[in-house]
Image (tube, rainbow, N blue to C red):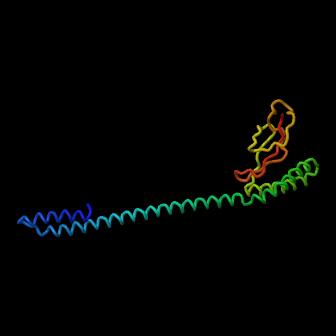
Amino acid sequence: MNIKNIFKNKTMSTENTEKDPIVDESTSENIVNEVGSADELTAEEQLQEELAKEKDKFLRLFAEFENYKKRTTKERQDLFRTANQEVLVSMLPVLDDFDRAMVQIAKSEDELMLKGVELIHEKLKSTLVSKGLEQVELNAGDDFNADFAEAITQIPAPSEDLKGKIVDVVEKGYKLGDKIIRFPKVILGQ
């Protein structure tokens, strides 16, 4: 009920009471009290609505900030995880050359040189592993999966069990965390 209707109803009731010999003086006070309480209710309701709106804004802003923090934290972790990628990729040919040198030195009969080179080779590998580098494990006889290896050629399979499978691994593959930074190069059996 709005204020105009209250006044209208009360004035009509006061007109009727004027004709009555018994007139209550509290009627005019009731009109003023009802009008005042109606204003208070609407003001209180407005304040409640404004409070609810501000709470909603605050919660949305807080949620947006939390999402921002999570996103930047994830980006930072990804950056740290792959920050060494360029350096590690440039070190892979050196590691490959070292692996080939180890095979040739193992053929020689100089055990002291072999031991020394093995120590250096292991130190290099352990340093690269400590930076997050992992070798993609593939061997001859494994099933070929194009998601984890690159086939460079196909040759007639030396045996029936190697048809459609890896015959030889020409170049080792490496990954940094979950990301493959160099796919292994393999030869498939036909």
Q: Residue at x 24, y 67 (%)?
A: 35
- Corner quadrant of residue 89: bottom right
Q: Residue furthest left?
A: 21
> Percent x, y for residue 101?
89, 52
Tell me the quadrant of the picture where the N terminus can be found.
bottom left
> Percent x, y for residue 33?
21, 68
- Give the camera-side residue of 133 and 16: 16
Q: Residue furthest right?
A: 109
85 left or right of 155 in image: left
28 left or right of 75 in image: left
- Give the camera-side residue of 157 and 121: 157
63 left or right of 102 in image: left
Tell me the quadrant of the picture where the C terminus can be found.
top right
Q: Residue at x 28, y 67 (%)?
A: 39
Q: Is residue 80 above or below residue 159?
A: below
> Percent x, y for residue 66?
54, 61
Q: Residue furthest top?
A: 160
- Give the camera-side residue of 135 and 143: 143
Q: Residue at x 81, y 58 (%)?
A: 90
> Exactly how many numbered labels are in the figure?
0
> Percent x, y for residue 146?
76, 42
Q: Residue at x 21, y 69 (%)?
A: 32
- Corner quadrant of residue 138: top right
- Corner quadrant of residue 116: bottom right
